[in-house]
Amino acid sequence: MKISDVVYTTMDELNEMDRFDLLEPPRKAKWYLQIVAWLLAFPETIAVRAKVRKFRMNGVKPPYVLLVNHNSFLDFKVATKAVFPHRSNYIVAIDGFINREQLLRNVGCFGKRKFVSDSSMYRMIKHSLDVNQTICQIYAEARYSLIGTTAILPDSLGKLVKKLGHPVVTLINHGHHLRQPVWNLNKRKIRTTSDMTLLLDKEDLKTLSVEAINARIRAAFEYDDYKYQYDHKIKITYPKRAENLHKILYQCPNCGAEFQMHSEGNRIWCDACGETHEMDEYGQLHNTAGATIFSHIPDWFEWIRTQVRQQIDDGTYCVDIDVNVDALPNSTGYYRLGVANLRHDGQGFHLKGEWDHGSLDLHKPVLANYGVHVEYAYFGKGDCVSFSTTNDTYYLFPVDQTFAVTKLHFAVEELYKKATKK
């Protein structure tokens, strides 16, 4: 089945399908497939003239944990270059295995459902380190950064690496979002730089508290691709560099209207008030007819977050929309169940579908998800949000595609923060 196919199924048929095996131990990459992986990775790293700078890495050899920031598929290729000639195991979301499960398992990948607590992950990672004696690559942000800045990291990360007891290395890539932002996958011509650093050795892991370990990881993960572009005067001449930016910057800072933003070429504008901005070749925004409120794109993005947070604090936040539901039980592909209602508010997610072939009634409380996965123009099906249970992942495509799924991205994070503070 092609990922782009819309294949309808019934609840009975879905329930009878095999589920993805999350308990199979990660395999050590087959030597001949590892050579293929190197051959596939190096052409693009050469195209972007990827420079990997190494700090405190003298004498560091596998096994160790490699924490990598996540902005595009280029991350995997640069990581392959950075650890050469060593092999790795990789945590990969279930959708990455579609139509190629055995291939990915044989190059060292093992699966996880995103943003779901899974006790087996510790065993899988430990197997990679202790049995396979490899590097275990963890993309701790769990999805592509939407705006080229640090995505939220789980509090459990510090506890995990402390318990594992193996050295922790970070690989922070700069420019990968600029090369291929998640909201516009056309590749730009750009040079990239990556910093590979031994962050925590075994002694650090023994002596530091979980809180101190988390603080050190979070400090290492501070990055901003648009600042990197401006500071290094990286010129991007791609004429459609702002196209689809409105999917991320969905609220107008001038009039406050939501879901009225549009973009084309190098421009983004508000249909409600007409305010228009142009993105220059260095990633800066300029109001074409007045004062520029946000020239730095991540500042606009974070301002929208404050608007969602205010709605949550006021008790007015609520999303209630109809969605097409695609289920992902295993690596064979997506199966469409039909149109359901998705409600998200201070109680969390409630997905409810009533069909001739059965029903679905799923609650996800606020504390069940510290983050959520969103996609844009996903294989021609539209923008979507996804979340998982232990056995299934649901991709939810708003029937009204003018709704910006990015709002759910903000709301899940802000609701979780508020709940954990309580």
Image (tube, rainbow, N blue to C red):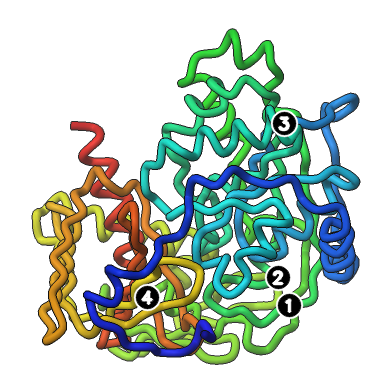
Contact between marks 4 and 2 (CB within 8 A): the answer is no
Q: Position of residue 249 (x, y in %)?
A: 42, 72
Q: Secondary structure at mark 2?
A: helix
Q: CA distance from mark 4 to mark 2?
A: 23 Å
- Amino acid type at image mark 3: Tyr
Q: Earlier in the sequence, mark 4 or mark 2?
A: 2
Q: CA distance from mark 2 to mark 1?
A: 5 Å
- Amino acid type at image mark 4: Cys
- Tell me the residue at 84%/29% (across/down): 61
- Amino acid type at image mark 2: Arg
Residue 170 is drawn in which quadrant? top right
Q: Mark 1 = which residue?
A: 188
- Amino acid type at image mark 1: Arg
Q: Which mark is residue 179?
A: 2
Q: Quadrant of the C terminus?
A: top left
Q: Nearer the viewer, residue 63 or 53?
A: 63
Q: Earlier in the sequence, mark 3 or mark 2?
A: 3
- Tell me the residue at 77%/64% (across/down): 233
Residue 409 is drawn in which quadrant? bottom left
- Tell me the residue at 25%/35% (across/down): 420
Q: Which mark is residue 384?
A: 4
Q: Earlier in the sequence, mark 1 or mark 4?
A: 1
Q: CA distance from mark 4 to mark 3?
A: 35 Å
Q: Nearer the viewer, residue 294 or 167?
A: 167
Q: Nearer the viewer, residue 281 or 145?
A: 145
Contact between marks 2 and 1 (CB within 8 A): the answer is yes
